[in-house]
Amino acid sequence: MTQHPSNEIAAHDQHGAHGAHGEDSLPEIPHVLRQTDIDPRAARRAERQVATMFGLSAVSTILFVVAFVAVKKDSVINLPVIGPIGGQNLALGMASGLALFLIGAGAIQWARKLMSDEEIVDERKSFSSDDETRDAVVEKFRQGTDESGFTKRPIIRRTLLAAMALVPIPAIVLLRDLGPLPEKKFRTTTWAKGKRIVADVSYKPIRPEDIPIGGLVAGALPADIREVEELQGNLNERAKATIILVRMDPSEIRGQQIPGGDVDGIIAFSKICTHLGCPIALYQQRTKHLLCPCHQSTFDLADKGDVIFGPAARRLPQLPIGVDNEGYLVATGDFQEPVGPSFWERG
Amino acid sequence: MTIAQRAAATTTTWIDDRIGAGKWLKKNLRKVFPDHWSFMLGEIALYSFILLLLTGVYLTLFFNPSMKEVVYNGSYAPLNGIKMTQAYDSTLRISFDVRGGLLVRQIHHWAALLFVSSVSVHMLRVFFTGAFRKPRELNWVIGVGLMTLAILEGFAGYSLPDDLLSGTGLRIAQGIVLAIPLVGSYVSTFLFGGEFPGTDFIPRLYSIHILLIPGILLGMLTAHLLLVWYQKHTQFPGPGRTNKNVVGFPLFPVYVAKAGGFFFIVSGVIVLISALFTINPIWMYGPYTPDQVTAGSQPDWYIGWLDGAVRVMPNWEIVLWGHNLSLNILVPALIVPGIMFTLLGLYPWIEARATGDRREHHLLDRPRNAPTRTALGAMGLSFYLLIWISGGNDLIAQAFSWSINAITWTIRVLLIVLPPIVFVITRRACLGLQRKDRDKLLHGRETGIIQRLPSGAYQEVHAPLTDDAKAKILSARESYYEPIEAGPAVDANGVAAPKKGRLARRLSKFYFEQRVTPPTDEEIAEGQHHAADDLATVRPAGQITSGH
Ligand code: HEM
Ligand code: FES
């Protein structure tokens, strides 16, 4: 196509082939008279409408203050369709919402019915300066560069650039103490040989007999978890150590990450999804599949905790368990692979 | 002079004497603002942002961004005696013990949803009407930045109350950070002050949510609006509207009344919604703990597409020399969004390469008149919607009792197949509409009046178009391009033409090979002649004429 001259506002006649449709033949900007333009009674009606809306807005604001004092915190109102809703929230919201809305509705009605609705025209100018100005700018730049000697004194220029390139480094170094180095923290948990397994919430130790075949303990933790949390002042260990326990008929177990890591068909797996770290809870007893609610990664607990579907790439780590001399379930060591999401150094 | 006029005069004089505002006011008090419903989308975004600032500052008066554990003891009985962080505790207090606190929280959340929604639709409007073309490319880029920051800001806010849902969202974000090659585990421990969840993150996120991002947003928003002001708003084609003028209402009083009024309407509607519909009832989710989760939990809508992308990605992971490259996370969470936003930001230049056009454009395109752009937009939108839908694959599975497996595979296939189909269909539809427009302009609009020709055949009478319709259809000329032609392979001096520009030519061909030529004036004149003949023969209603 024809190259368009640059820096120009396109006009219809730029496309020569399509003929001139220039400014001179511009049609009028259409305008239709409104009822309120012709009929003074309609105008007065519009005026009254606008004033009523402003007035009602003022009333709503006062109602807001009344509601603030009068409506009790615990009052509940049952609305059709929407259901029960806090009375205070409803009253305060309706009052202030209407107060705002009515000002807006009034102003728009005013603009539409009573202010002039004739559109006006303004010209546009091209934003580009003319060539002379541009040349002058280039010249000024050249003059400035010359006077500074920026181009003629390369050693100044280069050292300045080097210094400027380095100067943000402190800003990055300063961030160093935001946290410790990761070290091996992503690889270990607080589980250790002999640590009892307790059920979440009740913190009671668990005996193998407590779990029937086909049963599930949806959340279990090391017995000392609360002391650890007290000591560390955070939930970090819980975020790594939480496990689930399932019991199946030993013949149903097709494979284990840790041979003999079960107790009579009770196997322990990390509860933390290897995809992005959600706790997993949906267990299908028939298929022995465990489904993560976050992105639906599915793990086969009867077969080494392998991923059988979904975006997770790694199996769920197994925790080796045994029974202590009082008959309670204990860990017989830590996980043998990192729990939770993958990371660069994981391997 | 009335009292009001005198007051206005005194005030302007006072200001003018000090900063010389007179000239500026003289020029701008009657500045013209074009009017169209779609121009209100950006306004909605602005007004919900103002509302966010106001309600956000109020929330800071009561919210306590601390991860220190306390035992709850307040008005919401079901959680009494439960351990939780101060962040969650103070959010409960705002919701149940501060009068009007819940309302302000709800306004803040609804305004956030409306903010991101209106920014998104506003962006679509700008895209499909070509408002990003020269000289407005800069403002498009600022807009893409605003969109990105709006999403981040929303996610940061959503994560502050430390309820079970927001904590789960943070856990996922931390998993994504861990997947960053080389530095992931370092970035994660630095951000969280150690391992997840630690006790540092919410206070840090708080500074980001109430200071850093709003500060940048405010600065960019100001630049955005200054540019709109300075460059003047675009307008849709219509009678008397050209590329060299602006037609609309004066700033004072009509635009001030309409825009000011609209601010109150948007605020009022958000407050009314907040009065009636509960959003983010954090008391029902309970405090965050890393070993619990609720099934079927959904993020706010604008995070859904990322969540969905993460869900459909196959579980690819590369392990080399003891190092992991988690493609299953990197691709959907960082690479694809990165590419999407980069392409979006660069789009004005991509299209300018194809048109070779360096002119300023102030008249908006009708989407049909830019078929390839419109089709590309529809294609991108279909991709976005698909991954967004995939973010609810568990809900779909539940609602229709389909298997998640089947849904995920269906979406994977659709992601590859559907966008190109949408592209083709949309482009055809646009070209078809353009052809119809052309016909209308040449033969007039269909009147529904049937006429019998001397030959005995029946034919519909066509009437001339209104000025408005004519101007709209004629605007196709502004959007019309032909593919850039290659120059001669060897120039007059026998020097081979540079290879440069081949890409642009290919791009141009892709954009403009299929096109509909807008009618020329001669064609129109001829067409009108026929139409006039048609009309001359129309008789009063009901009568079928015969003969000429
Ligand atoms: C574009 C701007 C903003 C967006 C999209 C946004 C979004 C959000 C969202 C979604 C929440 C969760 C609300 C909930 O509890 O349901 C939130 C919480 C919060 N936001 Fe914002 N916000 C924005 C600006 C601000 C500003 C400017 C401030 C303060 C100056 C602020 C202060 C807060 C505070 C203190 C909370 C936590 C209190 C609570 O959740 O009750 N926000 N924000
Ligand atoms: S976190 Fe479990 S599937 Fe994503």
Image: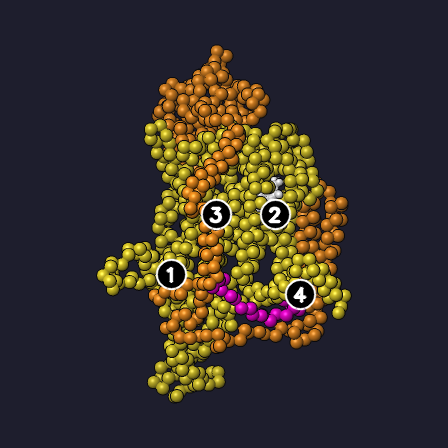
Chain colours: A orange, B yellow
Give the image location of residue B226, x and y in percent: 56, 56
Q: Which secondary structure lies at badge 4?
A: helix
Main SS of the magenta part reads: loop
Q: Nearer the viewer, mark 3 or mark 1?
A: 3
Residue found at the far top of this picture: A325
Label 2 beta carbon within 8 A of ligand 1 = yes
Residue located at (42% from left, 31% from top): A343
Q: Nearer the viewer, residue B224 or A312?
A: B224
How many neighbours does mark 2 have within 10 angstroms: few (below 14), some (14-19), or many (20 or more)? many
Q: Earlier in the sequence, mark 3 or mark 4?
A: 4
Give the image location of residue A208, x and y in percent: 47, 19
Q: Label 3 amino acid?
A: Ser
**Is residue B144 at all visible to an observer of this figure?**
no
- Residue at the spot of label 2: B52
Q: Is residue B422 above or below residue A114?
A: above
Q: Is residue B515 above or below residue B54?
A: below
* Distance of label 1 from label 2 (alpha carbons): 41 Å
Label 3 beta carbon within 8 A of ligand 1 = no
Residue located at (70% from left, 65% from top): A49
How many neighbours does mark 1 have within 10 angstroms: few (below 14), some (14-19), or many (20 or more)? many
